[in-house]
Image: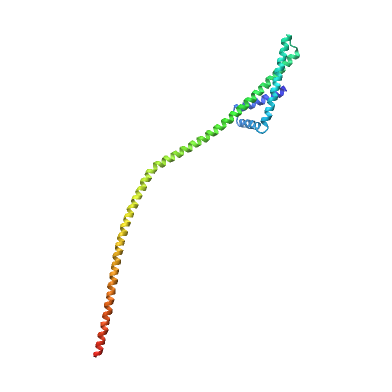
Amino acid sequence: MIQLLFLVLFAEGAVALLLMVKVGPLRELAMRGVDQVKTGKGPATVKTLACTLSVILMSSVASILNIQNRRLKLGTVSPMDQVLWRTHLLEASLIGYTLFLAFVIDRLHHYLRKLITLRQTASTSREEVEKLQMENRSLRENEEKSPNEIKKLQREIAKLNENMKKLKSETEEHKKKASAAEAHVNALQKQSEELLLEYDRLLEDNQILQAQIFNRG
């Protein structure tokens, strides 16, 4: 029993040391091992072992107290009682150290997990802050560019308004020219109709004159 307790105590001491001091990837391995112990049936097994060791510890303490009471009553202690007293004292000490180291390992694992979560949260928050800073810079740059762009757009709008005015004036001139050309065409059509009528009248007069000349001849 004592040899097993020494083995467990050394194993717990090694795990606690690896959790406290980062030695390459050994801390991660220790964290994974404790994670596995805390998952599934591990917690129930650990609690059962802790209760069993606590019962053995109380039994050893009770035996130590009984031996001390006998010593007080008798005034002397037999060699067997001395051996039993030392054995129970060593056993109780080893069990106490084992339970204490188990508690230390549990707390170290708990706080390291919290520290890892906080670091991840801090890195995520840092990334979000950097992203927000970049967005703020881009917004400031856009705000600085926007007045120049607005002035540029205002110039383009002014140019477009001038072009629209020119186009309107040109359109009005074209309309005037078109109306004048239409009036001229109408006048030419009337003049052509009058000329055709005059031509027909002259043609009739010519035919009449030719008929008169032919009758006289």
Q: Viewer-proximal residue, 67 or 128?
A: 67
Please name the residue shown 25% across and 90% down the image.
215
Q: Viewer-proximal residue, 118 or 19?
A: 118
Q: Viewer-proximal residue, 134 or 173?
A: 173
> Outermost residue toward the bottom?
217
In the displayed structure, would residue 173 be above or below residue 80? below
Q: Which quadrant of the figure has residue 201?
A: bottom left
Taking the image as shown, residue 172 lies to the left or right of residue 47, namely left
Residue 64 in picture, x, y percent from top left: 71, 16
In the displayed structure, would residue 44 be above or below residue 70? below
Taking the image as shown, residue 208 lies to the left or right of residue 83, namely left
Q: Is residue 22 visible?
A: no
Taking the image as shown, residue 212 lies to the left or right of residue 63, namely left
Please name the residue shown 51% across and 35% down the image.
125
Residue 94 in picture, x, y percent from top left: 68, 21
Q: Is residue 212 visible?
A: yes
Q: Quadrant of the N terminus?
A: top right
In the displayed structure, would residue 73 be above or below residue 116? above
Please name the residue shown 70% across and 22% down the image.
55
Q: Viewer-proximal residue, 78 or 39?
A: 39
Q: Which quadrant of the figure has residue 2?
A: top right
Q: Which quadrant of the figure has residue 31?
A: top right
Q: Quadrant of the C terminus?
A: bottom left
Residue 209 in picture, x, y percent from top left: 24, 85
In the displayed structure, would residue 38 be above or below residue 214? above
Please name the residue shown 34% across and 48% down the image.
155
Residue 187 in picture, x, y percent from top left: 28, 70
